Image (cartoon, helix red, strand yellow):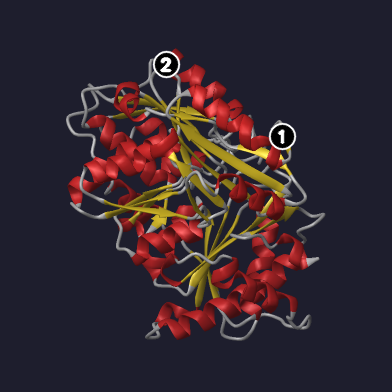
Amino acid sequence: MLGRVFKAYDIRGVYPDLLTDYMAWQIGCGSAKFLLNDAEQDGEATPMMRNVIIGRDMRASSPKLSEELIRGITSAGASVIDLGLIDTPMMYFAINYLDASGGVVVTASHNPPQYNGFKISKRKAKPVGETTGLDIVRKNAAMVDKNLTPQPGTSVDQRDLWDAYAKHVKKFLDLGDHDDKNPLRIVVDASNGMAGTMCPKIFGRNGEATEGLEIVEMNFDNVSGEYAHEPNPLVAANLESLQAKVIEEGADLGLCFDGDADRCVAVDEKGHIVACDIMTALLVPYFLEQKPGAAIIYDLRSTKAVKEEIDKHGGKALRGRVGHVFMKQLLAENNGIFGGELSGHFYFRKNFNADSGAIAMATFLSVLAASDKPMSELVKPLMRYVQSGEVNFENEEADLALEGVMELYTERGDIDELDGVTVDCFEEEGWWMNIRKSNTEPLLRLNIEAKTQEILDEVYAEVSPTLGTKVDH
């Protein structure tokens, strides 16, 4: 039963049917044992190394799961620093700010309210995924002694780090000549999630604590744990109210956050959604001005325009696997300055190589403030190719289907298996595509990009029969 809630990058399930209070205690024990052992092996011991930081999102089940998680952590011999309600990126800051052994956030990110789960990070906010320790946490949790109780000498300390965190985030914000007489006016949709807490704490209510910024707030109430729309900004339907509000308010930009506010999606002043890979391409010159020649990472589903912009501005383009575990690792290993993922995660070297929706927001605003053009004109030159978007196909024989794709195109283009199967015929035929397996469902996920819609349609018609039954959601 325990194994069913462990995913590739985190722990997640419907509460209390699949994810239970007892599991939260087990996971607390297993996480603490892993984090303490890993910290001891990582280097010189510090006074804070026996501490595990925890925080939680706004879901109705989060307080009880936090309580059981704390009981498990202290039963394994670690002390707890409890930050209370936080956005997930605040955990990455806190681990480094306090030099703790690691941390656990109680959250199910963008999932519906009946879900909950845990995101674990180790020392220096390095991610804990299936290949970087989550398998060990699972084994530790499964083997825990049911009779364990909180050990003598452990403690639970409530801590408020919002002021320090706000100071950190605002280092990334530069509104230039904008002041309160000439502010940037933006609409923020918090999706009834943790951005409803984060934005006022950092930027002030309606942006009033930040000179040159005015924020029109949408869905900032996160007390009930209920949502005006699903807290997933990658679903276009969830952005419709934001798009309408941006036009109604005459705003310069719209931003939508997911449930735990680690992802951020933009809408331009005309109400058009700006894809996250296009936003990555837009930020390339901004970061390469700060560190010429630096590496910038992007996930392999991104538009060709990202690499082209990195090459054009003298950076080092690094294409990575999908998922925050892989993106953070790639950024750290190559001393990169910035990275972007199609899912709305943006990564920053000066943020401990971690992602942050708040810092993405600050960076988007800084780029917009430095230009005399509206967002629609800034991104228009980057939208030079046609994309299919992610199309899902149900297939119980996914591996066989991928083999079929490689056989079909083996003589036509470059093929690699960095993450799923990528076929690149861009130079010869004007298109490329990536097909990946879902981590949790019998699905294949297809992304195609082409120089024209006609070429894209031809490739889609050619490859789709190999992939299975299209899923219309």
Residue 402 drawn at (x, y percent):
64, 51
* Quadrant where the image shows the C terminus: top right
The amino acid pointed to by label 2 is: Glu
How many marks the image carries: the answer is 2
> Which of 340 and 95 lies nearest the eye of the viewer?
340
Q: Using the numbered discs, state the Cα–Cα distance from disc 2 to disc 1 in whole angstroms.
A: 38 Å
> Which of 70 and 394 lies nearest the eye of the viewer?
394
Residue 312 to residue 189: above or below:
below
Q: How busy is the neighbourhood of tag 2: few (under 14 within 10 Å), some, or many (20 plus)?
A: few
Answer yes or no: is residue 178 visible. Answer: yes
Residue 409 drawn at (x, y percent):
56, 45
Secondary structure beneath disc 1?
Answer: strand
User: At 25% across and 22% down in the image, what residue appears?
Assistant: 373
Asked if residue 56 lies left or right of residue 404, the reply is left
Residue 138 drawn at (x, y percent):
68, 72
**Residue projecting furthest to the front:** 411
Answer yes or no: is residue 203 visible. Answer: no
Asked if residue 459 lies left or right of residue 115, the reply is left
* Quadrant where the image shows the N terminus: bottom right
> Which of 413 and 129 lies nearest the eye of the viewer?
413
Asked if residue 104 lies left or right of residue 452, the reply is right
Query: Disc 2 designates what residue?
Result: 249
Q: Quadrant of residue 110?
A: top right
User: At 17% across and 29% down in the image, what residue appears?
Assistant: 177
Q: Earlier in the sequence, mark 2 or mark 1?
A: 2
Secondary structure beneath disc 2?
Answer: helix
User: At 45% across and 24% down in the image, what residue appears?
Assistant: 452
Residue 73 drawn at (x, y percent):
62, 74
Q: Which mark is residue 470?
A: 1
Q: How busy is the neighbourhood of tag 1: few (under 14 within 10 Å), some, or many (20 plus)?
A: some
The amino acid pointed to by label 1 is: Lys
